[in-house]
Amino acid sequence: MQVVKIQLRGLMKNDNPSKDSGIEQTWEFAHPNNQRYTGPIDKFKSMLKGASYSMLLNHKEHKVVEMYLTNEVAMYEVTIMDENKKYLYHFYLIIF
């Protein structure tokens, strides 16, 4: 759960300490297969700034709830609050 929270805190303050540092931190946590699919980094930045994910950037608040956890897989329900709406995501992590 800590990895999800670290990434969300970074995205919440995306431009602190430098422009897009939250996105770059999230990229560093991504599995290499995911990086190959969503990268390079500039493409990943564009994806997160697009309509599907932009609410993650500079959001006001988030809540993480563990839904499922085994030795191999973790699933978290993440609620994102921005200044206009509430969004719900499910994060799936493969544990190595």
Image (cartoon, rainbow, N blue to C red):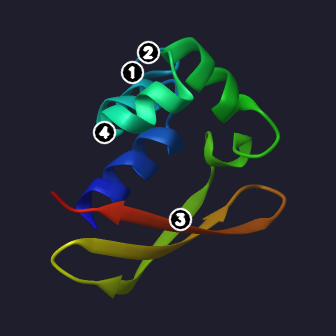
Question: Which three-letter amino acid code belongs to the residue tagged 2?
Answer: Ser
Residue sitting at x 62%, y 54%: 60
Assign a secondary structure to mark 3: strand
* C-alpha gap between disc 3 and disc 2: 21 Å
Depth check: 13 or 50 in front? 50
* Residue at the image position 75 percent from the left and 69 percent from the top: 86
User: The N terminus lies in which quarter of the figure?
Assistant: bottom left
- Name the mark on residue 50: none
Q: Which secondary structure, mark 1?
A: loop
Would you say the residues marked 4 and 3 are in contact, meaning their CB atoms lie under 8 Å apart?
no
Q: Reading the chain from its start, which is encountered first: label 4 or label 2?
A: 2
User: What residue is shown with label 1?
Assistant: 17
Q: Amino acid at mark 3?
A: His
Q: Quadrant of residue 76?
A: bottom left
Label 2 sits on residue: 18
Q: Which secondary structure lies at badge 2?
A: loop
- Residue 26 visible here: no
| Residue that badge 4 annotates | 29
Badge number at residue 62: 3
13 left or right, relative to 7: right
